Image (cartoon, rainbow, N blue to C red):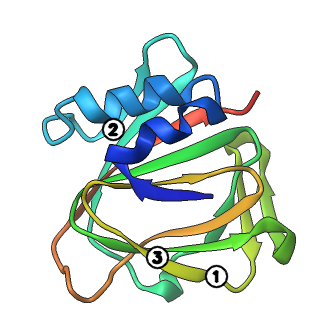
């Protein structure tokens, strides 16, 4: 997992061949104007998902993992608690390989994702996103870029 502010993203561009393009998109696109939904990021195989939703409770959000894609999650507006636990400390409850979604069971530690911050979740990471902090009750607007694992 990587957790930082977008201003420091260049430090991580060499971690994956597509990260530089992902971070450039986050820095230069008008993220507030993007329509909610999915769109390809050029011809890279990456998918940009623009989401806007009310914060959820810890009890209503499943701990998840992915095998085929890395999640780059960037907060545009609002804030959320986002849980993290190394996958080696989890057990797999269910597996939907067609949608690259594994429900995991484990004890997460929580960070607050605020505007300008991003988190990167690799296949080795379990994460629980979208949880309300209590301080922000309005909708959360977040960009998730699904990056193919090579």
Badge nearest the viewer, 1 or 3: 3
Spatial CA span between label 1 and label 3:
10 Å
Q: For the image shown, how many numbered marks are present on the structure?
A: 3
Foreground of the two, 48 or 89: 89
Query: Would you name the residue on which mark 2 appears?
Result: 37
Badge nearest the viewer, 1 or 2: 1
Instruction: Point out which mark residue 12 bears.
Output: none
Residue 119 % position (x, y): 49, 56
Dot 3 falls on a residue whose secondary structure is strand
Residue 128 % position (x, y): 55, 71
Q: From the image, which quarter does the N terminus lie in?
A: bottom right
In the image, residue 34 above or below residue 104: above
Instruction: Point out which mark residue 108 bears.
Output: 1
Instruction: Point out which mark residue 111 bears.
Output: 3
How crowded pointer 2 is (Cα within 10 Å; few <14, some 14-19, many 20+) is rated as few
Residue 110 % position (x, y): 51, 81
Image quadrant where residue 130 sits: bottom left
Image quadrant where residue 48 sits: top left
How crowded pointer 1 is (Cα within 10 Å; few <14, some 14-19, many 20+) is rated as some
Residue, x 58% and y 20% (percent of image)? 45
Give the mark nearest the N terminus, 2 or 3: 2
In the image, residue 126 above or below residue 30: below
How crowded pointer 3 is (Cα within 10 Å; few <14, some 14-19, many 20+) is rated as some
Dot 2 falls on a residue whose secondary structure is strand
């Amino acid at each position: 997992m990587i957790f930082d502010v977008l201003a420091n993203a260049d430090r991580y561009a060499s971690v994956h061949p597509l990260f530089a393009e992902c971070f450039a998109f986050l820095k230069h696109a008008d993220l507030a104007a993007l329509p909610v939904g999915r769109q390809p990021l050029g011809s890279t195989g990456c998918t940009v998902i623009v989401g806007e939703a009310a914060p959820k409770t810890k009890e209503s959000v499943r701990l998840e993992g992915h095998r085929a894609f890395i999640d780059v999650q960037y907060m545009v507006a609002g804030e959320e608690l986002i849980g993290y636990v190394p996958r080696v400390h989890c057990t797999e409850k269910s597996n939907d390989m067609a949608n690259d979604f594994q429900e995991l069971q484990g004890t997460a530690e929580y960070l607050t994702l605020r505007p300008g911050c991003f988190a990167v979740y690799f296949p080795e990471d379990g994460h629980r996103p979208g949880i309300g902090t209590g301080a922000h009750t309005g909708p959360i607007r977040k960009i998730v870029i699904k990056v193919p694992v090579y």
